Every structure is written in C-alpha cells, then in structure tokens.
C-alpha cells in the first residue's frame, strides 16, 4: 500500500505545491504551466519507481508458484 502512496504523491506533489504557491503568494503568475509541472511530475515518478525497484524486500532464492486448478479445486499460489 505504501508503494501506491509514494507513486501517487510523486505524480500529484508538483501540482499541489504550485497551487499553494499561487494561493498564498501574489508573486507568481496565475497562468497554469501544465508542461513544466507534468515534466517535474514525470521526473519524480521515475525517481520513485527506481527507488521502489531497488528497495523492494523480496527473499532471494525463493520461487513463486502461481495458483492452479487440481481436482476441481483451486490450489492457492505459493512461494517456496
């Protein structure tokens, strides 16, 4: 679940920061820079995905066995 929160935050954070800056300061032009914010959002998303890829906690040497159908019953997936 925390992975989804990190990914969604990486996508939405630049837009929220820009909105708050426009809302609380009068120095920024109110024109909405969608390309700049989208590119920053994309960069943060790539950084978050790379971070999550290299920090995933999966045991080394285990094999995933997908669920299967045997004797009219579904045998659940296993990690051995």
Image (spheres, rainbow, N blue to C red):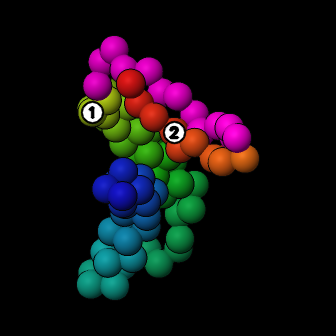
Residue at mark 1 to residue at mark 2: CA–CA distance: 19 Å
Q: Which residue is mark 2?
A: 77
Q: Is residue 60 magenta?
A: yes
Q: Which residues are magenta?
A: 59-71
Q: At 56% across and 62% down in the image, what residue appears?
A: 34
Mark number, residue 13: none
Dividing the picture into quadrants, the one containing residue 11 is bottom left
Q: At 36% across and 51% down in the image, what residue appears?
A: 3
For the question of whether residue 10 can be seen, the reply is: no
Left/right placement of residue 12 relative to residue 34 reads: left
Q: Main secondary structure of the magenta part?
A: loop
For mark 2, does the 10 Å Cα neighbourhood hold few (<14), some (14 to 19), or many (20 or more) residues? few
Along the line of sight, the residue nearer the viewer: 28 or 71 = 71
Farthest-out residue, right = 72
For the question of whether residue 58 can be seen, the reply is: yes
* N-terminal label among 1 and 2: 1
| Image spot of residue 80 (x, y percent) | 38, 24
Q: Which residue is mark 1?
A: 57
| Image spot of residue 27 (x, y percent) | 31, 76
For mark 1, give the secondary structure.
Answer: loop
Farthest-out residue, top = 61
């Amino acid at each position: 679940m925390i992975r989804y929160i990190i990914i969604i935050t990486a996508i939405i954070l630049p837009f929220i920061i820009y909105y708050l800056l426009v809302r609380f300061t009068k120095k920024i032009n109110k024109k909405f820079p969608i390309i700049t914010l989208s590119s920053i959002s994309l960069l943060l998303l790539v950084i978050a995905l790379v971070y999550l890829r290299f920090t995933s906690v999966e045991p080394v040497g285990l094999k995933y066995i997908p669920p299967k159908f045997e004797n009219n019953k579904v045998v659940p997936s296993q990690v051995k």
